[in-house]
Image: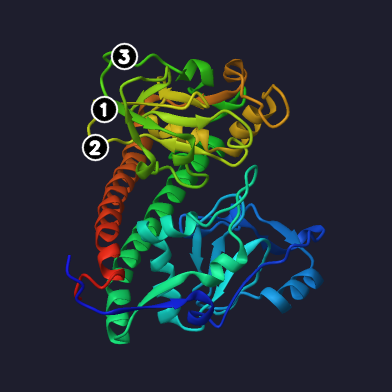
Amino acid sequence: MTQLFEMKRIAAIEFCSSVRDGTHDSPRFHENGYPLITSKNIKGGRLVIENANQISEKDFVDINKRSGVEQWDILFTMIGTLGEVYLEKESEVDYAIKNVGLFKCGSELKGKWLYYWFKTPLNKKKVLQLRRGASQQYLPLGALRSLQIDFPTDSSFAERAIKFISSYDDLIENNKRRIALLEESARQLYKEWFVRFRFPGHEHVKIVDGVPEGWEKSSVADAVSINPKTPVDKGEEIKYVPMSSLSSSQMTVDTSKFELRSKHTNVKFKSGDTLLARITPCLENGKTAFVSFLKEEEVACGSTEFIILRAKKVSAEYTYLLSRDEHFRGFAIKSMVGSSGRQRVQKSCFDKFFIAVPPSAIQHQFNEIASRSFRQIANLEHQVGQLERARDLLLPRLMSGELAV
């Protein structure tokens, strides 16, 4: 395609005020302190601080004398997991970095431009071609400094392009925030009704043997089908869902990581099923998903590192929210056996964890509320997928000057 806007190439060290990396030291961890960000904490353009190790205030100050992150800086994973980027938009930064590339951009325009430049497939490929190392791959700091960044000679085009593409990301972020709020409200409803037993009319119901009178005390294995059989025609192409598509915090599955396979694993599932990670450290990290395909009859297969939970005596929504319950997860984690670093949940543990199965009237009330939230989440997730696909089609053409705004 014809280039509409002229681009110039500038070395990253000239485009930015500085290109450096985080500390190489290993400060002592503290129970309460400041997060120390490494490559594992940067995923999909986001900063995952929840599982970051904490360091003392002194170490935080010392590290930031050399590698302090400021607003509109870019963090770039350069050891182990390569090429993940994060743009810091906040003016107040309360973390330090270790073994992470730091591009100090100094302005919103430069920060956003470089962020999107890194996100284009061609530039990702260029950067990854510079990797070194065998057992653990890395990108040398010198190579990052020498990266040739394409930037328009007309800076007003850069401003328009960034504003245009950012509008997609703003819509995506807004939808993701709504998804998180909807899921949190469903989780709180589950806890209120089925853990704390504050369901409608609870004031007039006695607790008998640990559950409200008229409710059934049931093992999870009896209330939910564990790894049920799901028939599919031999040789038929179906989606394969890897463990990496599961989230630690949200119910939706990352569909960008799906691939089609005609040779299926024995782990097959369909809409309404819950996928529960069964291995360390994925279970401890909370990797779980609610399967929601556009076609109700669609079947997929996945990693043998999942356990499939399918509604039987309780609804699909109840089943998923149970899988997110900290008491249930803690019990499953304690059941794990196997060698260190590769332990697995035992299917037999589901015979020993008991839940309260409510009468049909209470179930119906709960399902009406919860299913509305789940449907809204599925619709929002579909919108997110459409927006991401549109953005990813436009991004390379914008960043190369081939598309006018």
- The residue that label 3 is drawn on is 231
Kindly state the secondary structure of the residue where label 1 is placed.
Answer: loop
Kindly state the secondary structure of the residue where label 2 is placed.
Answer: loop
Q: CA distance from mark 2 to mark 3?
A: 19 Å
Q: Residue at x 36, y 58 (%)?
A: 122
Question: Where's residue 380, x and y in %?
Answer: 30, 51
Relative to 340, 358 lies left or right: left
Q: Which mark is residue 298?
A: 1
Q: Is residue 298 above or below residue 233?
A: below
Question: Identity of the amino acid at label 3?
Answer: Pro
Kindly state the secondary structure of the residue where label 3 is placed.
Answer: loop
How packed is label 1: few (under 14 Cα within 10 Å), some, or many (20 or more)?
Answer: some
Q: Nearer the viewer, residue 240 or 99?
A: 99
Q: CA distance from mark 3 to mark 1?
A: 11 Å
Question: Where's residue 361, x and y in %?
Answer: 35, 29
Q: Residue at x 56, y 50 (%)?
A: 81
Q: Is residue 123 above or below residue 358?
A: below
Q: Residue at x 27, y 69 (%)?
A: 398
- The residue that label 2 is drawn on is 294
Question: Identity of the amino acid at label 2?
Answer: Leu
